[in-house]
Amino acid sequence: MNEKVALASCNGMSPNGLVSRVAVGDAKKEDENIISICMGSTSADIKGENNTMLKKYPIISINGCNGECVNKILENRNIKVKKSINVGRVLENFEVRAKDPFRLDEESEECVKIIKNEILSEVDEIID
C-alpha cells in the first residue's frame, strides 16, 4: 500500500495541457493522498537535486498531447512513471473538447471533470 501518489501534469501550451493542469489541481483538492510535481522545476534541475523526492512516491503522468513530454522529461531523469494518462486519448471516448490553451469554457470544464475522475480512479488503484 502506498501512502501518497504524485501527479505530474503537462505544462504545455495546448488546450489539453490546460485541462491536465486544472484536473491535477482539482484532484489534489479532493484527495489528501495526492501530491503534485512541478515539471518546470523537474526540467530545470540539471544537477538532479530533486531525484530523491521524485522517486519517493509512485507517479502518474498526465500528458496533454501525443508528444507525452511529461513521460519524456521524467524518463530523461531515470524516474519511472507508474501510470500514464493521455488527455487526448481519454477524451476521444467523449463528445467534449477543450479549445483554448488559456481559458476554460463550459465544455473544457467538462473535460477537466472527466480527466479528474480518471486520475482519481488511477490513484485509488495505486493506493489500494
Image (cartoon, helix red, strand yellow):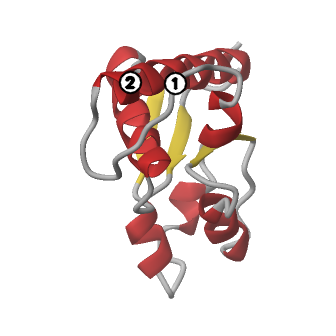
Q: Residue furthest bottom?
A: 46
Counting from the top left corner in percent of width and height, residue 81 is at 72, 50
Mark 2 to mark 1 CA distance (whole Å): 6 Å
Residue at coordinates 24% horizontally, 43% vertically from top-left?
103
Residue at coordinates 57% horizontally, 62% vertically from top-left?
52
Q: Is residue 90 visible?
A: yes
Q: Quadrant of the C terminus?
A: top right
Q: Which residue is mark 1?
A: 96
Label 1 amino acid? Val
User: Looking at the image, which is closer to me, 35 or 21?
Assistant: 21
Q: Quadrant of the N terminus?
A: top right
Exactly how many numbered labels are in the figure?
A: 2
Label 2 amino acid? Glu
Residue at coordinates 53% horizontally, 40% vertically from top-left?
6
Instruction: Give the quadrant of residue 3.
Output: top right
Q: Kindly state the secondary structure of the residue where label 1 is placed.
A: loop
Would you say 3 lies left or right of 79 here? left
User: Looking at the image, which is closer to me, 46 or 101?
Assistant: 101
* Residue 107's disc number: 2
Residue 107 drawn above or below residue 9: above
